[in-house]
Image (cartoon, coloured by chain):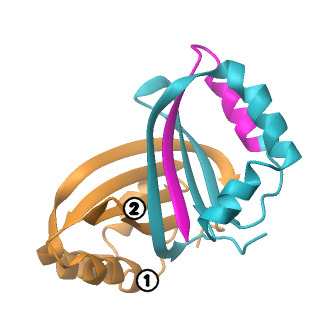
Chain colours: A orange, B cyan
Amino acid sequence: MYGLIGKMKAVPGQRDALATILLQDVGPMPGCLSYVVAHDPADADAIWITEVWTDQESHKASLTLPAVQQAIAKARPLIAGFDSHVETVPVGGHGLAKAG
Amino acid sequence: MYGLIGKMKAVPGQRDALATILLQDVGPMPGCLSYVVAHDPADADAIWITEVWTDQESHKASLTLPAVQQAIAKARPLIAGFDSHVETVPVGGHGLAKAG
């Protein structure tokens, strides 16, 4: 499995709008086992995204999906920057969906 | 929802053993929507744990479950320390299990 843990900063006041795009505009992503969008209660502009994929190739391929590209284009003006980005190797757990 | 993103360091050489305890000894946890244990490919002793719960109370209650307390007792000697611990407010996503 391939995992990502990232923190992005929204343009001030745009966190809810950004989270909505990240959740609603993305659509089904083959190989995606988990994709969670979260607010940071300690930082009013910050969003955490945690992802689990069957493999890194599935994640890369997702970035070429039309719905994902459209979501990225729509989200970009609302993103102020990226604070952290960690790649992980998930070894197991609970709540991992079947690969779509 | 209530989320946690944490990084812990295993005693050198004990990461696999620690991850196995965190995955296999924990058992069902009511209110747990997602629980993922991952290796950090950039740090041979590091483990990331990402969790999503229905609410903070469910997470607190899980720490009193006998299986979880036994897993903690078994894991403790293998843990060298905690690097980071972030609380989040998940707002949605994919791969969230039904609350057990």
Q: Which residues are magenta?
A: B1-23
Mark 2–mark 1 contact, CB under 8 Å? Answer: no
Q: Quadrant of residue A68?
A: bottom left
Left or right of A100: which side holds A50? left
Left or right of A79: which side holds A71? right
Left or right of B18: which side holds B91? left
Q: Nearer the viewer, mark 2 or mark 1?
A: 2
When the figure is inspected, residue A42 is found, relative to residue A3, above or below; the finding is below
Q: Residues within 10 Å of mark 1 (few under 14, many from 20)?
A: some
Residue type indicated by callout 1: Gly
* Front in this rendered view, residue B57 or A49: B57
* Front in this rendered view, residue A11 or A60: A11
Q: Quadrant of residue A54?
A: bottom right
Indicate which disc residue A11 carries.
Answer: none
Spot occupied by residue A93 in the image (x, y as percentages of width and height): 68, 51
Residue type indicated by callout 2: Ile
Q: Chain of mark 1?
A: A
| Residue B49 appears in the figure | yes
When the figure is inspected, residue A79 is found, relative to residue A2, above or below; the finding is below
When the figure is inspected, residue B98 is found, relative to residue B20, above or below; the finding is below
Q: Name the residue: 82% across, 57% down.
A: B28
Q: Name the residue: 68% across, 55% down.
A: B60
Q: Secondary structure at mark 2?
A: strand
Circle 1 residue: A27
Q: Name the residue: 21% across, 62% down.
A: A9
Q: Gap between marks 2 and 1, in whole Å?
A: 16 Å
Circle 2 residue: A49
| Residue A96 appears in the figure | no
Spot occupied by residue A52 in the image (x, y as percentages of width and height): 52, 57
